[in-house]
Amino acid sequence: MMNNNNLHPLSISVIIPVYRGGDNFSQCLESFKNISVFPLEVIVVVDGVDLESYQMATKFTDKVLQLEENQGPATARNRGADIAKGEILFFMDADVTIHHDTLAKILQVFQENPEVSAIIGSYDDSPSASNFLSQYKNLFHHYNHQIGSREASTFWGACGAIKRDIFLKIGGFNQHYRFPSVEDIELGYRLKKKGDPEGIGYAVRILLCKDIYVKHLKKWTIYSLLRADFFYRALPWTELIHQNSSFTNDLNLKYSSRISVILVYLFLILLIPIFWYKQLIFLNIVLIVILTILNLPVYRFFQQKRGLIFTLQVLPWHWFYYFYSGLGFTLGTANFWLKKLITQIK
């Protein structure tokens, strides 16, 4: 670890895009009152006509941008970065709160690792919303970050910091994404491309810092979970994977997850002939046992955090997650190759 006593202290700009933030946004702003290190500035970008969020923001900071129409978080974050003065840009969502030491730890990592271009943090293990789906979804996200590789291959807009000069050189977030989608992952892929295609001048390092936390306040429902996971994540992420040939064994793309998808579909396929061939029940039982053993670390995590009853509730939802993830990958792959075929024909 480097001695940073004589190093130039870095400045950090916080950028928060918001649209219809409501009480979650209010809590987000309130969380800045108890931090140990204050940023150079907090820039709020109100993404469209949203008087309530605008009034909350102007009471908190004088750095408020009002976009005339809703254009999505990618554009909102870029507009905030355009006026930011800090050497480090910290992007966070309007439905998270920061811990008292979040910014301090971010600055420390950059100070002690000057070769690092960007870092991402993690959701903490105490989600705000108390309903089962919110606890399951947010804890599962926390788990994936905690088992991820420190040398990250992606970026994360809910808790991600990047050097401002790098962000501007690479062109910021891709504004093609009009909804909260995979714009942060796409940025990470561009940052990690080999051969320095963006002319940055050196290899880019992104670190996953597992002790840098934000708390997620979002209350998940069945509808919002499926819309986000399937339409806003699985489908566009699949296309992104094929475009970049990036099947990294990390986070949600670990080999164990890919095998689990196959096992879930084998289980479902075998349900049909079971009516005629009862002995197939035993094969399905074997598949369930293998699936459970393969994901035992996940279930142990939930058992430690929320107990046995909660973990038993997790099982069907976790397998359902593998089902719609596999479906999303299949449809996304078909869409990718269809687009490619049409382009070739033209």
Image: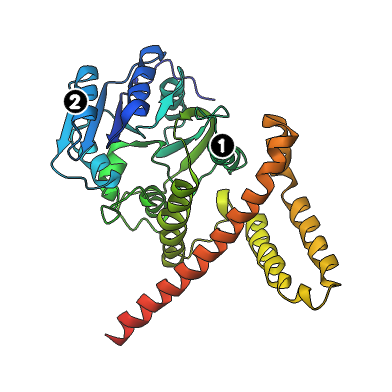
Q: Look at the picture and state if 204 lies above or below 108.
A: below
Check disc 2 and report the residue beneath it: 63
* Amino acid on which the number 2 mark rests in the picture: Lys
Q: How far across and down, in percent of the image, does residue 36 sit?
A: 42, 13
Count of numbered tags: 2
Question: Residue 80: percent from the left, percent from the top?
Answer: 22, 36
Camera-nearest residue between 160 and 260: 260
Q: Residue at x 39, y 39 (%)?
A: 117
Dot 1 corresponds to which residue? 142
Taking depth in this image into account, of 248 and 18 the one nearest to the observer is 18
Q: Can you name the residue that lies furthest to the front here?
A: 275
- In this view, the residue in front, 13 or 35, is 35
305 left or right, relative to 29: right
Going by the image, does 105 lie left or right of 64? right
Q: In the image, what residue type sits under mark 1?
A: His
> Who is closer to the viewer here, 108 or 274?
274
Q: Is residue 194 visible?
A: no
Q: Residue at x 79, y 65 (%)?
A: 284
10 Å crowding of disc 2: few (<14), some (14-19), many (20+): some
Residue 163 in sight: yes
Q: CA distance from mark 1 to mark 2?
A: 31 Å
